[in-house]
Amino acid sequence: MTAGQRPVVRTASSGTFGNGMEYLRFGSGPKTLLFIQGGPGSTVPKGIRRRVFRRQFEPYLDAGFSVWIVTRRRNMPPGHTITEMAGDYAHVISEEFGGHVDVVVAESFGGMIAQYLAALHPDAFGRIVVVIAAAELSDWGKDIDARMAGAIASGDAGRAGTVFAEYLFPETRLGWLRRLLGPLIGSRLLAASDYPPEDVQTEARSELSFNSRDVLPRIQPPVLLICGDSDRFFPKDVAAETAGLIPDCTLVWYEGLGHLRVAASSRVARDVLAWVNGN
């Protein structure tokens, strides 16, 4: 650390905002990064998952950001749409962040929300990054998320784990492995699911009608879109179409990687910071 440089404070704190959205904050840097996590379902990370997030966000802390992981509202109305979820995030930015955050990084389901946040609430942020999301979810993705949400809502750990294993091992020939790992994965999933199960169902239903193509041309702030070219949730042609519909979009491909491997890649934070600092 050079003379006069302030040390990076890496403490974590958590709580609940006035509208029922929970948060976990890392660091105390002067710049603000809001992270919108995937789904269906959103939770404040705990245990191993919290440590994984901490490692992923370390480059942002080093760059002077405080990182806020903010969940969806609790007890959403059954018909709550992705557009309305974007409004929830705009509301919390208005009420809790003084009306503006420097950067929004949104992943998967969160990236679907972020497309509407960018189009309908452009003054809420400076720059926005959409990771492993695009204008429409594949039929395969809708099916697997619906089955996952149903299993979580019913408390069926084995079924939830077996469905989640399809994310990792989608090949039909590996069904035996999914069934073997299902109970173990499911017990961990349900142990971490401290959100109302009805909210998981609400998010899964909102995916069925999600199609952001009409609003993408309205996005005026610059967008960074990071996608894997082997993503089964958001196929390559849909991601390329999404980038083409956004007036100011930088598209970065992670070649040979699928949905979960892009999400776990240490490249994401580096690419986000390079884009933020280079524009």
Image (cartoon, grey):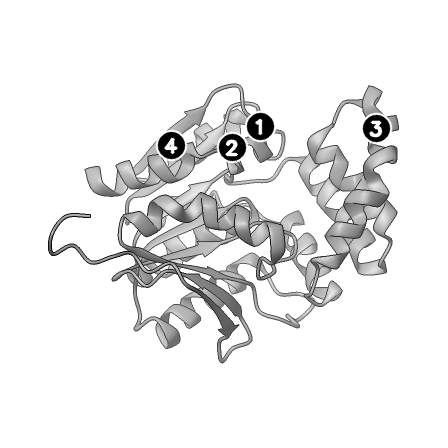
Residue 4: % across, % down: 11, 56
Residue name at image x 48 percent, y 55 percent: 36
Q: Secondary structure at mark 2?
A: helix
How far apart are labels 4 and 3 at the CA level? Answer: 39 Å
How far apart are labels 3 and 1 at the CA level? Answer: 19 Å
Q: Earlier in the sequence, mark 1 or mark 4?
A: 4
- Closer to us: mark 1 or mark 4? 1
**Would you name the residue on which mark 3 appears?**
177
Q: Assign the C terminus to one quadrant of the image.
A: top left
Does residue 57 lie above or below 86 as drawn?
above
Residue 149: % across, % down: 75, 52
Amino acid residing under circle 2: Val
- Neighbourhood count class around disc 4 (C-alpha, 10 Å): few under 14, some 14–19, many 20 upward: some
Q: Earlier in the sequence, mark 4 or mark 2?
A: 4
Residue name at image x 61 percent, y 50 percent: 48
Q: Are marks 1 and 4 in contact (CB under 8 Å)?
A: no
Q: Secondary structure at mark 3?
A: helix
Q: Secondary structure at mark 1?
A: loop
**Would you name the residue on which mark 1 appears?**
258
**Would you name the residue on which mark 2 appears?**
262
Amino acid residing under circle 1: Gly
Extreme-left residue of the structure: 3
**Would you name the residue on which mark 4 appears?**
244
